[in-house]
Amino acid sequence: MDAVARGEKNAAEDKAWDNFQQQFPNADKSKFADQVNFAKNHMASAEIFFKNSSGVSASVSGSDRRHWSPQMKTALGLDDVNGFPYQLSPLKTKKKRCQSPQWISPKQRQASRKSSTAR
């Protein structure tokens, strides 16, 4: 491997690990490995794989999250978020304010309907 190819390989590995660390900041990196591939145009691309105890590797970016093993989810730091499974962890969204200031009883609702239809 010449110096240019080695530089491409190192850059691809660094980029893959940086993206991985950004997406999964709580991951145990010791349970993952990278694989670098060279295209026909001599460009390198790297992918991160989970090293399963059975010897089978699973791609992190190229596989569906629904099919990740519990061991992979744990290694990625996704198994537990504030006491909830990561699928059920709350999304950070803005809360909408309720338009009505308080609860309206059925009698009040009925009276307001009658007054609005009488107009």
Image: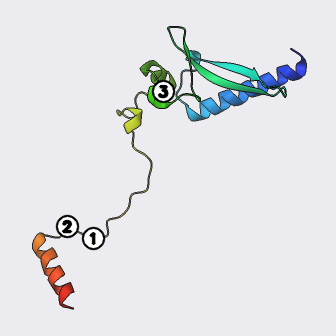
Residue carrying label 2: 103
Judged left or right of residue 34, residue 1 is right
Residue 20 image offset from top left, x and y in percent:
61, 30
Q: Which residue is mark 3?
A: 77
For label 1, the residue is 100
Q: Amino acid at mark 3?
A: Gly
Marks 2 and 3, how far apart in space?
42 Å
Q: Position of residue 7 (x, y in %)?
A: 84, 23
Report the amino acid beneath label 1.
Ser
| Dot 2 and dot 1 residues touching (CB under 8 Å) | yes
Side of 81 relative to 20 (left or right)? left
Asked where in the image residue 103 lies, by quadrant, the reply is bottom left
SS type, badge 2: loop
Reply above or below: 34 against 64. above
Relative vertical location of residue 94 with respect to residue 43 in this rendering, above or below: below
Residue 108 in the image: state x and y as whole percent.
13, 76
Mark 3: which secondary structure?
Answer: loop
Q: Label 2 to label 1, Cα distance in Å?
A: 7 Å
* Residue 77, percent from left and from top: 48, 27
Q: With 112 as the anchor, is 39 left or right in this view?
A: right
Q: Is residue 19 above or below residue 116?
A: above
